[in-house]
Amino acid sequence: MMGADKTLTIRSRTSTVDAEGQVSYSNSDTSIRGRFTVVNAEQSDLTRGPDGMRSSFQEAIAWVPVGTTITDADQIVVSGYDTFINGTWDIYAIQHTPNHYRVFCRGELT
């Protein structure tokens, strides 16, 4: 596993729909201190992307302090680490522990 224990950004997205039905998002970013670890991908995890090229849905786990306002509709933005870790990660599950939230994330690598 690769990981880092530094500042992470929680991005809350609010959607709005205009009169023509176009959806737009406004982002609200909050910086927190946490840990972010990428789980190694197996060769069997590779799938065909929409363009026919191989891609992988990389999985990661973030640990954030209890009391952080976070939902599974948010994203975690990682920057300033490594090109393998940097990027925007979608949250798909949150687990509460006594000391922190364990946030399961997914990102696409091509």
Image: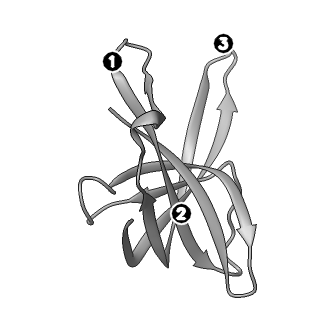
Q: In the rendered view, does 4 fall on the left or right side of 39?
A: left
User: Is 8 in front, or is 24?
Assistant: 8
Q: Residue under label 3, please give it.
A: 20
Q: Quadrant of residue 11?
A: bottom right
Q: In the image, is residue 108 above or below residue 106?
A: above
- Element on which disc 3 rests: loop
For the residues labelled 1 and 3, say whether their Cβ atoms are less than 8 Å apart: no
Q: Earlier in the sequence, mark 1 or mark 3?
A: 3
Residue occupying the point 43% across, 49% down: 88
Q: How many marks?
A: 3
Q: Circle 1 — which element?
A: loop
Badge 2: how crowded within 10 Å, few (<14), some, or many (20+)? many
Q: Type of residue at label 1?
A: Met
Residue farthest bottom in this picture: 99
Front position in the image: 107 or 72: 107
Indicate the position of residue 58 as horizontal and vertical percent values.
Answer: 45, 45
Residue 61's disc is 2
Looking at the rendering, in which quadrant would you find the C terminus?
top left
Q: Residue at x 41, y 75 (%)?
A: 7
- Foreground mark, 3 or 2, reads 2
Numbered disc 2: secondary structure? strand
Q: CA distance from mark 3 to mark 2?
A: 38 Å
Q: Residues within 10 Å of mark 1 (few under 14, many from 20)?
A: few
Report x, y in % for residue 38: 42, 59
Q: Which residue is mark 1?
A: 53
* Residue in view at x 56 percent, y 53 percent: 105
Does the CB distance between marks 2 and 1 fall below 8 Å? no
Q: Earlier in the sequence, mark 3 or mark 2?
A: 3
Percent position of residue 65, x then y: 62, 81
**Three-letter code for the amino acid on which mark 3 is drawn:** Glu
* Distance from Cα at disc 2 to Cα at disc 1: 26 Å
